[in-house]
Image (cartoon, rainbow, N blue to C red):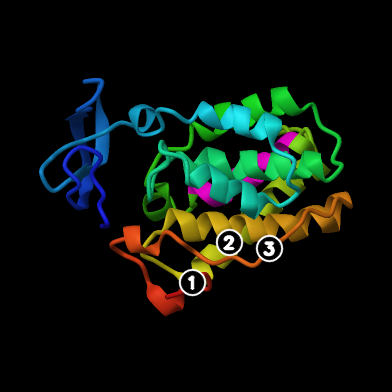
Amino acid sequence: MADECLICKSKIEYLDKEIEMECFICHKRELSKTRCVNRHYVCDECHTEGIDQVFDLCINEKSKDPIYILNKMMSMPFCHMHGPEHHILVGEALLTAYKNAGGEVDFVSSLKEIRSRGKKVPGGICGFWGACGAAISSGIFISVISKSNPLEIEPFALSNKMTSRSLEQIGNIGGPRCCKRDSYLSILQAIDFVEENFGIKMDKENVTCNFHQFNNQCIGKRCPFFSN
């Protein structure tokens, strides 16, 4: 059965303005526009609790297919239907497949860097900022493997182009948000982008979503990954 609130399983609502809320789990107080209809609020830190389990998965994973790796990640108990955990998982799945496909990278430190950067991308920004966190995660991945920073030339361009390509595909389909759909779209764009610009060919499997029954806002056949 589809649910949204981590506390009571009720629907999530988005407010017009930020108000101070208290996390139901850790009791931290901060400004947010997002809560459930019963006014439960869970901060991003608590929402991603348990994501450290993914580190061991990445270290031991041998697949060259980031979609396969992502599905393993998203099937772990810590991962919810929607949430900021996807802002980390996309980049880490891509990095793991990239390394396994022959990409040269300091793997452990790069995993940690993607985790650090991805955790700073807030939940809900797809609708509030016009930049989905899954797409940003694909750009973070490129920025890490290309050693980009604000003063670089080509790496700066590549990381922004990657995010742009992911966002274009996400925007072409439209809303409402789906963290699974947007993660798949971003990874598929990144697979082609990496081969074009880095000469590393990752595997690419056909994508069929097995999560739609948990999504209250599933768009059905309008989603390229939907299957009955």
Compute the Cα span from label 2 to label 1. Answer: 10 Å
Relative height, residue 93 to residue 177 (above, below): above
Q: How many marks?
A: 3
Magenta stretch contains residue 136: yes
**Is residue 164 visible in the rendered structure shown here?**
no
Residue at horizontal 83 percent and vertical 54 percent from the top: 201
Name the front one of labels 2 and 1. 2
Tag shown at residue 131: none
Q: Which residue is mark 1?
A: 173
In the rendered structure, the answer to whether residue 213 lies left or right of residue 56 reads left
Helix, strand or loop under label 3 = loop
Q: Which residues are magenta?
A: 133-144
Q: Nearer the viewer, residue 128 or 173?
A: 173
Tag shown at residue 205: 3
Q: Nearer the viewer, residue 135 or 202?
A: 202
Residue type at the position of mark 1: Ile
Helix, strand or loop under label 2 = helix
- Residue 194 position within the rendered picture, expressed as x and y whole percent measured from the top left: 79, 52
Name the front one of labels 3 and 2. 3
